[in-house]
Image (cartoon, rainbow, N blue to C red):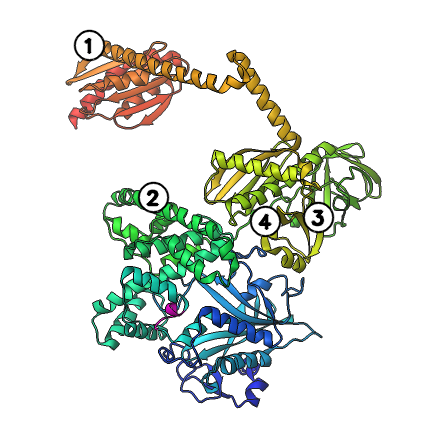
Amino acid sequence: MSSDLASEFQLEYFKENNFHRQICPKCGRAFWSQGIWPSCGESPCEEYSFINNSPIKKPYSNHEMREEYLSFFEEHGHGRVRRYPIVARWRDDVFFTQASIYDFQPWVISGVIEPPHNPLTISQTCVRFNDVDNVGRTGRHYTFFEMLAHHAFNRPGKEIYFKDRTVELCHMFYTERLGVDPKLMRYVEEWWEGGGNSGPCVEVILEGVELATLVFMQYRETPQGRVPMDMKVVDTGYGLERATWVSQGTPSAYEAVFGPVVKKIQSDLGIIPDPRILAEYSKVAGAMNMKTAKDIRDLRQRTADRLGISFEELLKTIGPMEDIYIICDHSRALAFMINDGVVPSNVREGYFARMLVRRALRSMRSLDVKFTLADIVGEQIDYFSPYFEELTENRADIMNIVSVEEKRYYETLERGRSIVQRMTRDLKGKPIATDQLIELYDSHGLNPEIVQEFSDVPVEIPDNFYIQVAKRHESTEAVEEGPKGDEWPLDMPETELGYYQDPEKMVFEAKVTAVVSGAIVLDRTYFYPEGGGQEADYGVLDGHEVTDVQKVRNTVLHFLKGKHGIKPGQTVKGAINETRRRQLMRHHTAAHIINGSARRMFGNHIWQSGAHKSVDEARLDVTHYENLSDEQRNELERRCNEVVLEDHPVEIKFMQRDDAEAKFGFRLYQGGVVPGKVIRVVNTVGVDVEACGGLHCDRTSRVGPIRILRTKRIQDGVVRIEYSAGLAAVSGMQADKACVDLLADRMMVTRETVLPAAEKLLAEMREDRKRLESLSARLNQIVSEALLSKAERADNVSMVVHQAAEGEDPQAIALALISNPGVVAVVGSANGSPKLYVARSKDVDLDARPILKSVMALVGGGGGGKPDLAQGGGGDPSKLPAALEQAPRIVREALVKRQAK
């Protein structure tokens, strides 16, 4: 590190408290400590020395350590903040919350809103998948973890604290609160960069473990170089699980964190691991950087050598425990992910949940367990719910989703063997490539180990297989709706949004402030522009038809039909199509009613993933693991109409973002991220609360009837609910009634007896169809027998050429003919567009396709097929008879060629 950067760490706290700056001879990094040390203390420079000999005064459970930390920082002036969801709904650039600072990006860091407290402390639940292949193998890696943190946001003139106080608080927590000998603590100098920001950081090391990272975010990285930030941020991250592990000194971190769950699985399986082997394994792993399968093999061999035991003896302990650890980690992650609204699927956030389900079930299959994954998830909920009440509230929903996924996995296994064997047949002995492994995993849900088990060819599983598949799904690509801002001038005048001030105003006057590419810009407008899935208002502007309205940045553009001649400076009169406006309002309000009702009916995992509201119909896409049954659809419709009749008020107001989040939580962001310091909150009281820019009825009773027209599963984990409301629903009901009345009239029955009468008629039609098919088959058989009796023979083959008469089925006749041995059939039909079938019996070694091609060339059509049955069509029907006359010659020539071969 250069001398100017080294100056970033010359803290007064270090100087005043007898810390010594030392250089690690192994890694070359500088570190500070009140003790004198031969290295920086972090692995691999130094092995773990806390196992079975904790430097912390007493053992803590995960829950005790969390409370100890948060209480300590509360006592030192920090406001305690509840965890944010694992799914980062307030951001559009990431799926998951991967660090506590994510909670405050971008809105707090950019200065748009105030933090909930300043300074603050939090235990943030996080998930990361960059080390998923190491989970269970190293004794310390997780996909789900809690990041303890304290943050301070410093603005000019409003300094909270920065480097010195941050290090002091950290040192006090470990030494005074947890009782660690101050001389054991080591603080390593490092530099941090991320998300376009950077700053010095200190890695906090205790007996081989990095317990915390103290980041001092103070620069912006720009093309012109490093620029000081207006806001300097204390961004700390303390590993809850690591601190718990060090306090207990258990052989691995998993025993410390999942103690009761690990013990239950061990007890159910009758496994009693050797703690000496586990401890040594963790120590060796701590001094290695695991990246490849070779690293894992080296880790195992080194451990076996140090213990003086065989490799096989080591694996007897390590193998089953790795699977147990994977099950524990993944089941906890699933409990929290599903609780926070993730539905396992093959897309977006759901992909990662499904990956954890499959990896956990693979480990359970390896152990041949009798319990289900849902059982273990339930154990995790029981263990964590006293400290996370939401897990108790959503327990049934979480367990149900895990059970559904588990069932699907085993159904996948049943299909898996034939899928893999089909692929290996095509490979003809070649190994299955990594891309093919990933495709089998993505498209069919087959873990690479399962593929290896089912495969007849070599399968080399990449060391980082799950990291590779995770990277393919990390993008948060969003579809941008409406016109792009950069397609319009930057200096367009702003428009006052009158439709928010008075959505009932349908006629107004306004001044034209600009005409941009023919679109009219007004100083204020009551025309609602397309947005939030709601179509735009139509109407007239100074007698000209308004055909579209769009909002670009802070400007509303009105598009008129034809040439209008309106110029800037004019005062114009606007009139909104009131019927259309009110119907769109009903459909938008109905979307909120359906969303809230579905969530209460099906579970906390229901989130809006898309919507569109037009005049005649609307749709709402929600996250759900299966399509709705008829009974569920009817019940949802009933519940929605109960909400309408209950006449809930719809309260709409603009709120400070932080106030809205504090009051309503992140359920606000059903329609995605909403920018800005102030957001518009639509509260359908007692039903649904969302940040929404659409127009709504002021009470649910004004929506009118809601009809759920149909539902369908449009992609894995997403169900589309198509519906109508208000007069559109009434029109639909009237159309249905008219249809039933007309049907009753035609069938000469009453409306009440239409259904049984229709069922009786359909049954009769099915019987008639069966009789007709039987007669048709008999007719084809008679025709084929007659044709065969006078067939021309060549080279021991009967050649049948026939032009089907009206009512005859040429394909059925051809198939009936070749059910006999030694037959080549050429059967055509000129009824409508020409059709031709060339078929041969199984015992005739002849390719039907060239014959078809030659005959169809005479007709002017084409075709293809298989060697035993080819079919063609098209061309001139008048040429078919002449073409069929040439067919015997063409067949004979084909037979001669066959004989020559």
Q: Which residue is at 28% across, 57% downward?
A: 367
Task: Report the residue at 18% width, 19% height from top.
Answer: 822
**Where residue 652 is drawn, which disc sits there?**
3
* x, y percent for residue 183: 46, 87
Quadrant assignment, res 820:
top left
Mark sitting on residue 821: none
Per the image, label 3 sits on a secondary structure element best described as: strand
Residue 239 seen by the camera: no
Q: Which mark is residue 670?
A: 4
**Amino acid found under the numbered disc labelled 3:** Ile
Quote the CA–CA distance across marks 2 and 3: 47 Å
Whole-angstrom CA distance, mark 4 to mark 2, is 33 Å
Region of the chain picked out in magenta, as a range? 251-256
Secondary element under disc 4, as helix, strand or loop, is loop
Q: Residues within 10 Å of mark 3 (few under 14, many from 20)?
A: many
Tell me the tag on residue 411.
2
Q: Would you say 824 lies left or right of 186 here? A: left
- Marks 3 and 1, how far apart in space? 85 Å
- Amino acid identity at mark 4: Gln
Q: Which quadrant of the figure has residue 546?
A: top right
**Residue 789: assigned label:** 1
Circle 1 Cα neighbour tier, 10 Å, few/some/many (<14 / 14–19 / ≥20): few
- The residue type indicated by label 1 comes to Ser
